[in-house]
Image: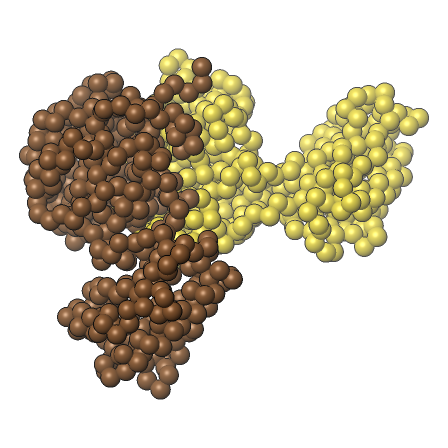
Chain colours: A yellow, B brown
Amino acid sequence: MQKVIKHLIQKNDSKIIFTVLDGLGGLPVNDKTELEAATTPNLDALAKVSACGLHMPVGYGITPGSGPGHLGIFGYNPLEYQIGRGILEALGLGLEVRKTDICVRCNYATIKDGLITDRRAGRIPTDHNRRITAMLSEHIKQIDGVEIIFAAGMEHRIAIIMRFPDPLEPGAADIEDTDPQQEGKAPLAPKPNNKSAGKVAALAAKLLEKAGQVLKNEGRANFLLMRGFSNMPHIPTFEEAFGLKALAIATYPMYRGLAKLVGMDTPVLEGTVEDQINFLKSKYNEYDFFFLHVKKVDSYGEDGNFGGKADRISEFDLLLPRLQELNPDVLIITGDHSTPALMKGHSWHPVPVMLKSPYVYGGLCSVFSERECTKGELGILPAINLMPLALANALRLKKFGA
Amino acid sequence: MQKVIKHLIQKNDSKIIFTVLDGLGGLPVNDKTELEAATTPNLDALAKVSACGLHMPVGYGITPGSGPGHLGIFGYNPLEYQIGRGILEALGLGLEVRKTDICVRCNYATIKDGLITDRRAGRIPTDHNRRITAMLSEHIKQIDGVEIIFAAGMEHRIAIIMRFPDPLEPGAADIEDTDPQQEGKAPLAPKPNNKSAGKVAALAAKLLEKAGQVLKNEGRANFLLMRGFSNMPHIPTFEEAFGLKALAIATYPMYRGLAKLVGMDTPVLEGTVEDQINFLKSKYNEYDFFFLHVKKVDSYGEDGNFGGKADRISEFDLLLPRLQELNPDVLIITGDHSTPALMKGHSWHPVPVMLKSPYVYGGLCSVFSERECTKGELGILPAINLMPLALANALRLKKFGA
């Protein structure tokens, strides 16, 4: 279907604002979901005149991570384009990922007499991590002409990028983890699963040896275990796939990284949602498509903080008229997945979505909520269909067949 | 799925009436769609006791042409069976298309000193077109044993069929357009993209030369540009796919042509919708399946005439009891796509559908409209599922598995 869409693309001056309240969907506590409990006069008024429904990020019963969640709403089949954990870790730490990169997420670990005694180095404090990661960065800048980039994560976690000078062959990241998943064992060597992964595995082995030298006097964090070798999937850009010049307005590195994977411009931003909306306004003439990412809704859901999540939705509701003032041709409000406070994490539930354009029926939902959206004209639809619908409503798709 | 269906077919004496109000779906103007604004007591009464829903002709956001729109409701995947523009043009002009035919749609053009000065011959009047097309028909009846058939279209448009004596290999129509899409350039030679297209391209080149001779003194319409070479896709017939002897009751050549592609009987008909219904009644004992095509609903939508489209629906409503009198085992009322007057053209919106048989729930929709159909028992379903549902409700499908 993506191939068909590509052939139907026509450009025009329309603007599409695609707002993602991260982890929007919830579950009832005292018979109200977070969205139902929030104070949302503006979202409700918009729902009354919009095409509403629920989107299924990956499939029935499938709880998506942030990667698949966003790829789906961006119009890419998350089962076809899988993003390796090494890349997601690097993106989450704000690293730029390039086509010639191999990314790995690592643990600091404790090794004694060649055997692992603690796979997580006693969960060293993040400060400790930062100090020794800076040491690694200082001592290991490149190996055999390959640039090495380190980025400290939380506690014992660290991301490493091996930046090769030239593009790698497909499968070059197909290398087994060096973490044996059990203490009392020796770390494994990086084992390549094909020929093109061989030189990457050899480089990783050299890197582990050098890192071991740098870390040898660092007590419990004296070794690295490597997991999730991965490289950039070949994803068509938003411009290639949809003919859209797209801007991501996101304050968290992970989401900028995901947007960058599909070729959006991803300026570094900080500040409140209001700041994000002001930034969007300042760039409104320069782009066709705006991905506005509101992170905090998810964060409170993850913490199991029902009231906090509802409050973040209420806060967004107050700002919604600021987006509506722009009178975009297509305005979409949705989430990338559900994060019910009740479950303290992502879930498989479909996500409320509304789409406003001049070409909708409207009149089917009285408020914006999970339950009302079941009555909407979009029904329950796979997330990857949201982009074709956005394009159609922006009159950016030609007729198929004569 | 089509393969599964085929193995479950069982024949019986049931009758299926499949009514297509072309371009039925609409959009609200003053908060009512054309279907909501029309006077439809009979359609509404039927909706109350039918299985209602909305069908998606091709996919979310995809606006179907008439070809894909009809193939979908006929139960064929419109992405798998694509009908070339040359064929559609020929069908639209009332030509019969056979398996050994190559169809091309052409423009009359003006050529001077070997360069195109007007790609549309100044949009010559249709009368002029008819006169010179008759000249071509008279002078070029066959080339190298291949019959050549010409049919005048509107203004500068003309359809040509090259009727080969024997079946052609797949890909035989894969030939580039000779229209360079720009004035001031020379027309291109018909360029074959594979070996089996070679002899067709060679024949097309001879045809162009002969046509040039015939037209050389015709002033501005002194040459032909060829576009959209195409041949019959291999589509299983209604009899093969569904075990149905099917009759198309359509007054427009294009729709008879589409029905003929899937093996329906397609007598030439003129007259009102009432005449069509009378004809259906006269043939009721001879067929299993009746495709009743009501064109005018779409025509008014295309013209942006909201009231006119609503009136055509109201008119059909008055005639509906005449179909109900027959007490068919399955009665379906739907469209092939939406044509909102608001958009003056086809659109991507799903199309209201209702199916009456003894085996439906009913009781979910109070009227027949886009919005009420969202509440129906069929939900939003891909168009290609309508035929299996029709067969099932006619008790023409056996159990799958033991």
Residue A377 position within the rendered picture, expressed as x and y whole percent measured from the top left: 29, 33
Quarter holding residue A103: top right
In the shown orientation, is residue B283 left or right of residue A238? left
Quadrant placement of the N terminus of chain A: top left
Residue B38 visible in rendering = no
In the shown orientation, is residue B277 left or right of residue A78? left
Residue in the image at 81% along x and 55% along y:
A145
Residue in the image at 83% along x and 50% along y:
A143
Front residue of B46/B367: it is B46
Residue that sits furthest to the top in the current view: A30
Front residue of B96/A205: it is B96
In the shown orientation, is residue A307 left or right of residue B286? right
Quarter holding residue A378: top left
Quarter holding residue B127: bottom left
Tally the numbered discs: 0
Front residue of A338/B3: it is B3
Residue A170 position within the rendered picture, expressed as x and y whole percent measured from the top left: 68, 47
The image shows residue B341, relative to residue B372, as above or below, that is below
Residue in the image at 14% along x and 24% along y:
B327
Residue A316 position within the rendered picture, expressed as x and y whole percent measured from the top left: 40, 35
